[in-house]
Amino acid sequence: MSARANILRSSAAHAILIAYTILALYPVFLIVINSMKSRRAIFNDPLALPTRQSFDLVGFQTVLEQGNFLLYFQNSLIVTVASLFFALLFGAMAAFALAEYRFRGNLLMGLYLALGIMIPIRLGTVAILEMMVAANLVNTHWALILVYTANGLPLAVFILSEFMRQVSDDLKNAARIDGLSEYRIFFTIALPLVRPALATVAVFTMIPIWNDLWFPLILAPGESTKTLTLGSQIFLGQYVTNWNAVLAALTLAIFPVVVLYLIFSRQLIRGITRGAVK
């Protein structure tokens, strides 16, 4: 009876997870299949797969020829990669310091950094815009990189600090006895041991940055600094919308996120499960 109950519970859990997966992936599936169909086919039967009669790549042609897609993609890639690099680097450094060095206010400092997870950064949009104008950074990549780095630091510190505390003290003390500096210990010992946590933070930080429309619209609306999300808006008109181009742009925008997940999926799962055990 106990074995049968375990099988039933396991089957129910898998059924729920499979149903949620289908529900989450179905909109992406619709976007991809409709991006390869003619405009008439999209409106006549949006749930149907492309056929020989309905198959049409005019949306991709429009995006690549008229939408300056490659520039927008490059801007998004630069901003996302740079923001991830600085958020992971500075977040890991702060987490290492909080976990390794005990000082008065250590706990309060950690709680203060964690407040950034609870307070939406968009509440400070006006102040951020004023600072960027004063620093002459509007319509530059650095305006977005600085904002996204600041927004990603609280989550990075919150997650990585727990993993940094699990790094063996004996291993670090042995490195100190061998004459390694604190920087060498951080880069050669601590960071490699928390790679699953770094992958987890990278995935959860990258997706909001890549999909963000708010700050590119406010801080970098210029043609030379538009990100992919903002650049796709040119196909959305007040009276006429080029749905082929919109769906094609969304399909191309999904690709980097999928690639990142495939690269870090194993590390991501390890990081999540280890965090759950803690």
Image (cartoon, grey):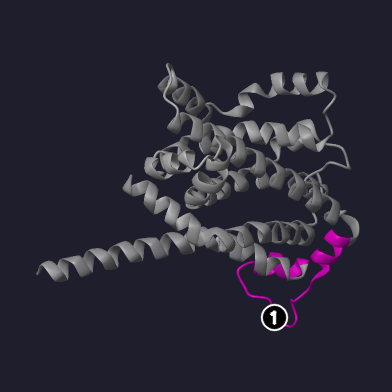
Q: Nearer the viewer, residue 58 or 164?
A: 164
Q: How many marks?
A: 1
Q: Position of residue 249 (x, y in %)?
A: 75, 57
Rendered image quadrant of residue 224: top right
Quadrant where the image shows the C terminus: top left
Q: Is residue 178 left or right of residue 107?
A: right
User: Which residue corresponds to the image point at 47% horizontal and 35% vertical from the top-left?
Assistant: 158
Examine the structure image and report whether residue 55 is included in the region drawn in magenta. Answer: yes
* Visible residue check, residue 69: yes
Answer above or below: position of 81 versus 130.
Answer: below
Residue at the bottom extreme, as displayed: 52
User: Which residue corresponds to the image point at 57% horizontal and 28% vertical from the top-left?
Assistant: 120
Q: Is residue 88 left or right of residue 102?
A: right
User: Which amino acid, mark 1?
Assistant: Thr
Residue at the top extreme, as displayed: 104
Rendered image quadrant of residue 142: top right
Q: Is residue 67 left or right of residue 129?
A: right
User: Magenta segment range?
Assistant: 39-64
Quadrant where the image shows the N terminus: bottom left
Dot 1 corresponds to which residue?
51
User: Which residue corresponds to the image point at 85% horizontal and 51% vertical from the top-left?
Assistant: 71
Answer above or below: position of 177 versus 264.
Answer: above
* Visible residue check, residue 240: no
Q: Position of residue 146 (x, y in %)?
A: 71, 32
Q: Residues within 10 Å of mark 1 (few under 14, many from 20)?
A: few
Answer above or below: position of 105 versus 116.
Answer: above
User: Which residue corresponds to the image point at 43% horizontal and 20% vertical from the top-left?
Assistant: 103
Residue at the front extreme, as displayed: 178
Mark 1 lies on a secondary structure that is loop
